[in-house]
Image (spheres, helix red, strand yellow):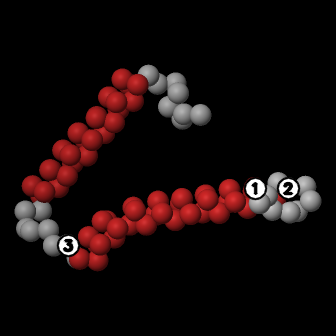
Amino acid sequence: MNSFSFLSKPQVMAITWGFALLLSFALRYWGFQHPEPFLIRSSLITVLVFGPSIFFLLWILVAALRESDLSVSSDPKGQSKT
């Protein structure tokens, strides 16, 4: 069930765009307040680039393992379905 089922699709889009614009203006304001160059570590870039894909890989593997455990345990005699 969708947690935003009480909102229509245009309302959800408007909220999303509004939040994105607010975040954009907040980051722009922060940039004006801190004009020095932003130094970033390479480890942070590595985590930002590879982190989401590793997270989803683990999520899919865990879901597949849980599904295979359920299919084996659903057999009443405890025998696997092969």
Along the line of sight, which residue is nearer the eye, 65 or 8?
Answer: 65
Q: CA distance from mark 1 to mark 2?
A: 7 Å
Q: Amino acid at mark 3?
A: Ile
Q: CA distance from mark 3 to mark 1?
A: 47 Å
Horizontal and vertical percent position of residue 47: 34, 70
Q: Please state if 29 lies on the left or on the right of 8 as rendered.
A: left
**Are circles 1 and 2 on residues that touch, CB within 8 Å?**
yes
Along the line of sight, which residue is nearer the eye, 23 or 67?
Answer: 67
Q: CA distance from mark 3 to mark 2?
A: 53 Å
Residue linked to disc 2: 75
In the rendered structure, find residue 16 and report the number of the disc placed on it. none
Question: Mark 1: which secondary structure?
Answer: helix
Residue most extreme to the front: 82
**Which quadrant holds the N terminus?**
top right
Residue linked to disc 3: 40
Of callouts 3 and 2, the N-terminal one:
3
Question: Mark 3: which secondary structure?
Answer: loop
